[in-house]
Amino acid sequence: MRGGKSRRSKAIGRGIRYPAAAVIPFGRRFLCICLFALAACAGSDGNEVSVDVRTDWIPAVEFDTVLVRANAGTPESTTVNFSQDFVRGVRVAELSNLSNGRQEINVQLVERGEVVAERSVPVTLSGDLAITVILTRDCNGVSCPGAGDASATACLGGRCIDPTCTPETPENCPVDECTTSDDCPTARQDCQAAQCIFGTCLYGDDGSCGGGRYCDEELGCTDRPTDMDLGPPDLGVDQGVDQGVDFGIDAGPGCGGAFCEAFEFCNAMLMCEPYPGCLTSDECLDGAICRNRRCIPPTDDPDGDGVTADDDCDEGNPDRFPGNEESCDDVDEDCDMTVDEGNPGILCENALQQGECQPGGICECPADFYDLDGMAGNGCECQAVPGAATAAACGGAIDLGSLDDSGESTTVSGNVLPDGRAVWYRFTGNDGADGTCETYDVEARLTTNPGNAYRISVLRGSCGVSADCPGEFTEYQWNADFRMSIGGVLTGTCPCHSAAGEPAANVPNCENYGSTYYVRVTRDGAAAPTCEQFVLTLSNGR
């Protein structure tokens, strides 16, 4: 089953209150990018790599330490605690003095000296970087590479992947497991919440178990381990002075010497504790409101975007708040319940791929439209005429009908987009009955040729013949309405003989020269693509 997490029916208590001694922390803003290198200025050796970790393994329960090292160097060790939200991301190491070039960043989750999970990420350094490494529980027991791609030596979301798979190199990545949390399979426990992190499903504690408990992958709501030191530490950082932020408790800075994460408050035991869970604001007391399934004070700003919870539509995303500018990502950044509204070209102005915003938050030009001027305001301003899949080969030439040699003509226009393309047309030049002079005179001419950018070539008779006039030109003529010596040979059929009896000396019989012509229009290789259209004029007879 896919979709949002299913829940058993249960009564929602209305007695949720904040502890009397609760210290409401300032909200923070978090930004974690999965394996995404934030480029600093290119520099010399002595680079620093900041490493964040995201995982659905439970800190202080399933792992107690994170080890991070570059290549075979000495690892940096970080002891974890239960209050850290590793699903959202935790900074675990600052590796310094790393040389330019390829480095292998190795991350291990360790419990009592045993490695629980491990992943290595290759990076190429030319300056300081910040990376986030995701380790998923469902990679436990998966051996990579598997039976498929031998280069897929890393594991993510239970699948073997190329270790070079990053948001900057999507061509090296498998198809995303999810695009939103609703795409994730149902959580194993009711107290788990799925989060879609860069196309991978992570399952974290949704806080519904209450204080002193956590959500176990196998058992559901479970008491925290008894060997955890839950008492307030003796900080001694303010020489016994009550700093006035903890209702008389000598807490030192923050909450027991630390600062609580978003959607947490400092309880009477100087422990960071999640705010009570909720589905609607009716379940919250003491004036709290329900945001992101937590009862929080309306003046809080957990995501640090500068808009308090009573006005913000999503306190879990600092890029969503009233008045924010929309971009093309299928997300409602300005909290008006509509995604990606506005000028479709402007929405893609800062995207990696230019174009116009399409359904699903994709920046690209609609079929047969192109952005030639690079201006976001008018988006994909130029339409291919004819469509890019039309008349690309001689056998699929656009039929323009027939032209009698009485002086009939027709015109057609286009712009031969995209670059490097050809457009084929065909027509039949009819040769009617002649009296004493042949009138057959077929011409193909670019009567409008912007920037002298377009060229034509012509095949007479079929697609398989050689051109009468090899090469590319701006005009072509095949006629018989003359009589002259060419290269010492008397040529042409005007005059010509069509009556009974013998023709006069040096007067040939009238003939039928009717044929089908295939005209190929291209753009000169040195000419830049243009939306300005050529006009091709075809005629027969004078």
Image (tube, grey):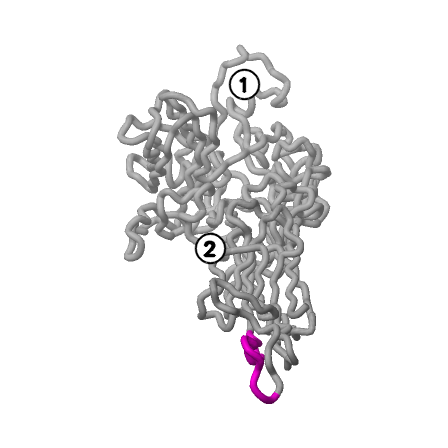
Q: Residue flagged by tag 1: what amino acid is it?
A: Gly
**Predominant secondary structure in magenta?**
loop
Q: How many marks?
A: 2
Residue 280 seen in the figure: no
Q: Residues within 10 Å of mark 1 (few under 14, many from 20)?
A: many
Q: CA distance from mark 1 to mark 2?
A: 40 Å
Q: Is residue 508 magenta?
A: yes
At 48% from the left and 56% from the top, the residue drawn is 471
Q: Tell me if 163 is positioned left or right of 406 in this view.
A: left
Magenta residue span:
500-515
Q: Residue flagged by tag 2: what amino acid is it?
A: Arg
> Which secondary structure lies at badge 1?
loop
Q: Is residue 329 magenta?
A: no
Which mark sits nearer the N-terminus, 1 or 2? 2
Residue 273 is labelled as none
Nearer to the camera, 305 or 141:
305
Nearer to the camera, 481 or 486:
486
Q: Position of residue 539 (x, y in %)?
A: 65, 67
Q: Is residue 88 above or below residue 126?
A: below
Q: Is residue 3 above or below residue 167?
A: below
* Disc 2: which residue: 188
Nearer to the camera, 16 or 284:
284
At 55% from the left and 64% from the top, the residue drawn is 519
Q: Position of residue 288 (x, y in %)?
A: 69, 39
Q: In the image as oriented, which residue stretches furthest toward the top?
A: 239
At 48% from the left and 43% from the top, the residue drawn is 214
Q: Position of residue 195 (x, y in %)?
A: 52, 47
* Disc 1: which residue: 252
Q: Position of residue 531 (x, y in %)?
A: 64, 50
Q: Tell me if 382 is positioned left or right of 219 in this view.
A: right
- Callout 1–callout 2 Cβ contact below 8 Å: no
Q: In the image as oriented, which residue stretches furthest toward the bottom?
A: 500
